[in-house]
Image (cartoon, rainbow, N blue to C red):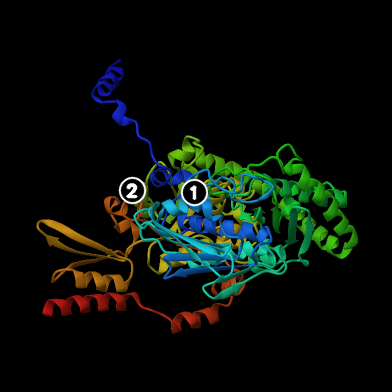
């Protein structure tokens, strides 16, 4: 009753009248609630950050022009990783409605499915969100001998001019994201290039010119798999194309499954109904072809595949369009599951009958996976029981409330888990973390070097077994409990070694965890430089020697310099600064040209003497660093 009375008292003191009712213009609403339109904001350090959504929204319109056979080239420039321009050679936005097309929500030319039957941008939102969230936005439409140009600032129209035009038709859009929304943002070329290559894989014949470099694809999804696979295929990539569907797949010797899925040219990073249908029917078709009682997981183990479909009026589970929710290929039409199932059931079966040599390779791979699974059957059962008991007693995992309370929704993207070593380090992180979204997994000593070992070690080794259970990735990434898996170790030789051992583990058994951008290294400061000013400390945290020198220059004479040798040395109060909103994370990436197998073989293999020689030749002694630091401090005191 006391709580209810307090609430009533609070309500009685808060005014609620006509002045509290506000109407926001379209542009104001986007700026006030950007998450509704582009998902996350971010600074560009993650491929799903908002600035890449802005870029994608602009390019999507140009892609739709290409799909309508209007313009085969798109020119994209990003100046100093800050300012973007996109020029296509399509039909140009109708000039009479140009203002509405870029600034009034729910306005667009794609509601009529006859004009844009299978388009990505159907909701009349995309470019308007770009306009509203840009400090500067320009659009030019070239058509019918005229060019109309509009300029905006933060969604507000500044200029509107029309002139004669004798050049090629099309649309030009330039924008500079608002750095008050995307604080400290920078476009990363590697993320941009991945996005652009995805467009070309799905639109063969389209040329994208990115900062002067020509990007195109002639073989569609085959090119995608060849560019993304880090392990050689066991047989040539199978490539099948039908009306509104294209698939490509092969098996590799790697563990797990790896999928790339698309809808109307949109990369659905989180999959959806089409990817689920592909997984189900590719396994079913192969099983029925061999007429053996194979398990689906054995059939799909090592499978690397891509699937692309075109859907009329697609429905996505969010505005960022990274997961398909459509159940049907068109309103009132055949289901996505049946359409994909019928195609795979016919075309893949026909292919296997015509290419029995490839069918035999698949059979050998499936039988190998089956033998390994059966050999592990007893071990895996005991391992799962141990992991369950460990989780019940909370021995290794300090989970976040998001999972403890089985909460669904937006927090999944925010959730992360820190993998750390030692009681002091895990204790500091546990006391400093956001208990709602940040979990901690504590390693006991250095992990095992898993290079060259079979998946049996994942179940026999307690650390790996419990980590696999904590992440919930035994059966694939669909069950991944945390969006970010963060390796948090000391910034010394031992810490670096533990990082390498953990990355080796993921590369060996869960490479897709890295390929999909889920694994990160936590950057913690090496130095703290501070001076007492007016009774308070002016503190600068430095993550490199260069930052330390710069901080000393900014400080008064005789600064106090502390070198952090381990995470456990950092107090929980200070640690909050390093795992909060400004947390520095270095993504672990995996690409074909990284030569991962060669690197692992050299650094983690049995070539002990060769590696020893390399270490001696490149050794940096810890004591030498300390001497240099002390020498620098003494010189400053002398001055």
Label 1: how many Cα within 10 Å (few below 14, some 14–19, many 20+): some
Real-space CA distance between mark 2 and mark 1, rounded to the nearest whole angstrom: 48 Å
| Residue 497 seen from this side | yes
Residue depicted at x 43% and y 81%: 618
Q: Give percent across and percent down for residue 130.
A: 46, 54
Residue 18: quadrant of the picture: top left
Q: Give percent across and percent down for residue 97.
A: 52, 50
- In the figure, 615 relative to 342: above or below? below
On the image, numbered disc 1 is attached to which residue? 100
Residue depicted at x 49% and y 44%: 105
Q: Name the side, left or right, on which 390 lies relative to 295.
A: left
Task: Pick the quarter of the image with the N terminus.
Answer: top left
The extreme left residue here reads 534
Q: Name the side, left or right, on which 220 lies relative to 544.
A: right
Q: Name the side, left or right, on which 516 lies relative to 499.
A: right
Numbered circle sitting on residue 432? 2
Label 2: how many Cα within 10 Å (few below 14, some 14–19, many 20+): many
Q: Give percent across and percent down for residue 330.
A: 71, 42
**Viewer-side label of 2, 1:** 1
| Residue 172 seen from this side | no
């Amino acid at each position: 009753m006391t709580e209810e009375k307090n609430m009533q008292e609070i309500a009685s003191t808060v005014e609620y009248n006509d002045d509290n009712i506000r109407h926001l213009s379209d542009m104001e609403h986007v700026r006030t609630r950007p998450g509704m339109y582009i998902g996350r904001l971010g600074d560009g350090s993650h491929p799903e950050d908002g600035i890449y959504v802005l870029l994608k929204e602009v390019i999507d319109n140009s892609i739709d022009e290409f799909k309508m056979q209007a313009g085969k080239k798109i020119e994209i420039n990003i100046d100093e990783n800050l300012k973007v321009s996109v020029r296509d050679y399509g039909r140009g936005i109708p000039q009479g409605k140009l203002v509405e097309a870029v600034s009034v929500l729910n306005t667009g030319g794609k509601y009529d499915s006859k004009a844009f039957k299978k388009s990505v941008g159907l909701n009349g939102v995309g470019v308007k969100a770009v306009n509203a969230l840009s400090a500067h936005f320009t659009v030019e439409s070239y058509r019918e001998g005229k060019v109309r140009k509009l300029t905006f600032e933060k969604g507000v129209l500044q200029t509107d001019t029309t002139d004669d035009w004798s050049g090629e038709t099309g649309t030009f859009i330039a924008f500079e994201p608002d750095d008050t929304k995307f604080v400290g943002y920078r476009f990363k070329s590697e993320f941009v290039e991945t996005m652009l290559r995805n467009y070309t894989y799905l639109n063969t014949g389209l040329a994208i010119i990115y900062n002067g470099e020509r990007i195109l694809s002639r073989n569609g999804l085959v090119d995608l798999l060849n560019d993304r696979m880090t392990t050689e295929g066991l047989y040539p990539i199978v490539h099948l194309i039908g009306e509104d569907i294209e698939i490509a797949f092969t098996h590799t010797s790697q563990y797990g499954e790896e999928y790339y899925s698309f809808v109307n040219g949109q990369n659905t990073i989180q999959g959806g109904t089409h990817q689920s249908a592909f997984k189900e029917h590719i396994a079913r078709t192969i099983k029925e072809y061999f007429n053996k009682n194979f398990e689906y997981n054995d059939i799909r183990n090592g499978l690397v595949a891509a699937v692309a479909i075109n859907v009329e009026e697609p429905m996505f589970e969010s505005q960022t369009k990274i997961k398909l929710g459509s159940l049907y290929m068109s309103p009132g039409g055949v289901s996505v599951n049946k359409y994909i199932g019928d195609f795979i059931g016919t075309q893949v079966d026909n292919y296997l009958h015509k290419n029995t040599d490839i069918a035999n390779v698949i059979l050998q791979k499936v039988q190998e996976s089956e033998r390994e699974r059966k050999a592990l059957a007893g071990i895996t059962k005991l391992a799962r029981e141990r992991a369950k008991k460990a989780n019940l007693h909370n021995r290794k995992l300090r989970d976040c409330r998001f999972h403890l309370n089985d909460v669904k929704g937006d927090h999944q993207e925010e959730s992360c888990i820190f993998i750390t070593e030692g009681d002091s380090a895990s204790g500091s992180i546990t006391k400093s973390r956001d208990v709602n979204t940040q979990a901690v997994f504590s390693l006991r000593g250095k992990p095992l070097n898993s290079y060259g070992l079979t998946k049996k070690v994942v179940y026999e080794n307690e650390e790996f077994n419990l980590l696999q259970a904590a992440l919930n990735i035994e059966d694939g990434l669909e069950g991944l409990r945390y969006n970010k898996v963060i390796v948090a170790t000391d910034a010394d030789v031992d810490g670096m070694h533990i990082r390498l051992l953990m990355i080796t583990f993921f590369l060996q058994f869960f490479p897709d965890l890295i390929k999909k951008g889920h694994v990160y290294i936590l950057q913690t400061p090496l130095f703290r430089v501070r001076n007492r000013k007016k009774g308070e400390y002016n503190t600068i945290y430095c993550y490199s020697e260069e930052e330390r020198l710069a901080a000393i220059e900014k400080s008064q004479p005789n600064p106090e310099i502390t070198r952090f040798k381990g995470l456990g040395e950092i107090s929980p109060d200070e640690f909050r600064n390093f795992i909060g909103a400004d947390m520095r994370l270095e993504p672990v990436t995996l690409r074909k040209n990284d030569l991962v197998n060669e690197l692992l073989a050299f650094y983690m293999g049995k070539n002990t003497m060769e590696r020893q020689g390399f270490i001696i030749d490149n050794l940096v002694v810890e004591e030498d660093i300390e001497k240099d630091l002390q020498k620098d401090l003494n010189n400053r005191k002398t001055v």
